[in-house]
Amino acid sequence: MPGSDKILVALDVPDIPAAQSLVKQLAPHVGGFKVGLELMNHVGAPQIVEAVRDAGGMLFFDGKFHDIPNTVAGAVRGAILPGIGLLNVHCLGGPAMMKGAKEAAITEASAQKIPVPKVIGVTILTSMNVAELQAIGMQQIKESRDITILVGHLALEAKKAGLDGVVSSPQEISLIRELCGPDFLIVTPGVRPTWAATGDQKRVMTPKDAVAAGADYLVIGRPITNPPKEIGSPADAAQKIIAELQ
Ligand code: C5P
């Protein structure tokens, strides 16, 4: 897959015109788009999917479901819409929840006679570091290596539960590849070119390094959708990243 096709742009904007404007500017350059909680809550999931799916490429429905298995299975059924290629749940919801999510995706997509989207698990959010994990009671996490081990464990659980891959920080890609094999999908946010601000992301890597480490898709939001002034437009930012990948 060419480097440009690996880039999924996070459409973290509050309305359909803003999302469509980004799609229009960026669809010729990148591999696809991600719609997430901001757009889903502002305009509705089916509405936003319908508004952006004609761009073609990969469409990632980033609903990050995390609830009891029955509720997540229902949420997944509701999220199966034509045009979606990827959707996700949190691994921290547990094995039964992950297994139920995948089964629900297969059943619902078959009922709608559409391709089954890949279901992937969010391991540990890329905005979490050692201090954040300790603050939620994970005192055994003492250094960043402990996060990597936890993420590797969650990725293996996701694989055992039948998920197609995981979302992880770029720093954990090599271990996940080693543990879960070449066909396991690794989607990574927390990607930052050297010229972009890290913002709230804590476990970051450059796009080039993330691809070299084995990422299948890079989810990139603000560095492309709101680039530093000196970089230019979103399309300029995307092209700069693609050039850096080559
Ligand atoms: O703007 P930025 O490049 O930080 O956007 C990253 C996107 O990836 C956001 O839409 C965020 O919701 C998503 N994401 C993440 N960390 C995860 C899973 C998804 O940042 N573990």
Image: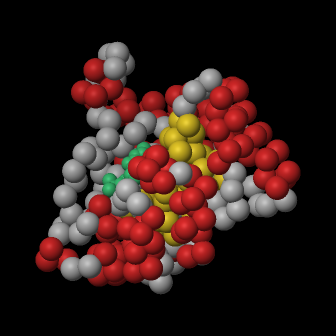
> Is residue 2 left or right of 162 when viewed as pictured?
left
The residue most toward the left is: 230
Rendering colour mode: secondary structure
Residue at screen point 70% across, 26% down? 70
Instruction: Name the residue nearer the viewer: 209 or 94.
Output: 94
Q: On the image, which quarter does residue 25 sit in?
A: bottom left
Total numbered labels placed on residues in the image:
0
Residue 235, horizontal then vertical, whole percent:
34, 80
The quadrant in which the C terminus is found is bottom left
> Is residue 105 left or right of 126 when viewed as pictured?
right
Note whether 160 is above or below 114 in the view shown. Answer: above
Note whether 231 is above or below 76 in the view shown. Answer: below
Q: On the image, which quarter does residue 243 sit in?
A: bottom left
> Is residue 81 left or right of 136 when viewed as pictured?
right
Residue at screen point 25% across, 45% down? 200
Residue at screen point 35% across, 65% down? 207
Residue 29, horizontal then vertical, whole percent:
44, 81
Note whether 158 is above or below 118 in the view shown. Answer: above
Q: Is residue 50 visible?
A: yes
The quadrant in which the N terminus is found is bottom right
Q: On the image, which quarter does residue 188 sit in?
A: bottom left
Residue 131, horizontal then vertical, whole percent:
24, 27
> Is residue 61 left or right of 11 when viewed as pictured?
right
Instruction: Name the residue nearer the viewer: 217 or 210.
Output: 217
Q: Is residue 209 visible?
A: no
Residue 8, horizontal then vertical, whole percent:
47, 65
Residue at screen point 52% across, 41% down? 64
